[in-house]
Image (spheres, helix red, strand yellow):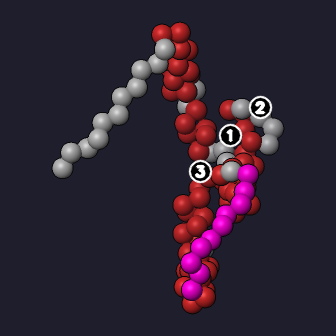
Amino acid sequence: MSINKQTHKLPNQLVDAVAASLEDWKKNNKVARLWQKDASLWSGTDESNWLGWLTITEDQLANINALKQIASEVKKARFKNALLLGMGGSSLCRKFCG
């Protein structure tokens, strides 16, 4: 089995900036802080309110029975199409994850 490989190359003017940003994230433990929903990684205001996507899997698994009920109702009604309207992933996650 072969795995597709991906490569990337930044424009020269961005290489140093990206390297500095990565070092800053490592040095200041920013990945852990992100998972803790630390709003100070951005403006320090309400960012912790829109980071529900970080725990979407756990949140949805905690409500798996409700999701199974919806799936059962959809099958029973013999839906053939569905239309999802929204402003994007973050607005949908705010509604369901926040």
Q: Residue 86 at x, y = what percent?
A: 72, 57
Q: Is residue 51 above or below residue 61?
A: above
One can see residue 32 in this view: yes
**Type of residue at label 2?**
Ser
The residue where tag 2 is placed is: 43
Q: Quadrant of residue 73?
A: bottom right
The residue where tag 3 is placed is: 54
Graded by Cα atoms within 10 Å as few (under 14), some (14 to 19) or many (20 or more), the crowding at tag 2 reads few
Q: Which mark is residue 11?
A: none
One can see residue 98 in this view: no
Query: Nearest the camera: 25 or 12?
Result: 12
The residue where tag 1 is placed is: 38
Q: Earlier in the sequence, mark 3 or mark 1?
A: 1
* Residue pictured at 21% horizontal, 45% vertical: 2
Q: Is residue 80 magenta?
A: yes
Magenta residue span? 78-87
**Type of residue at label 3?**
Leu
Q: Earlier in the sequence, mark 2 or mark 3?
A: 2
* Residue pictured at 46% horizontal, 18% vertical: 10
**Type of residue at label 1?**
Asp
Residue most extreme to the left: 1
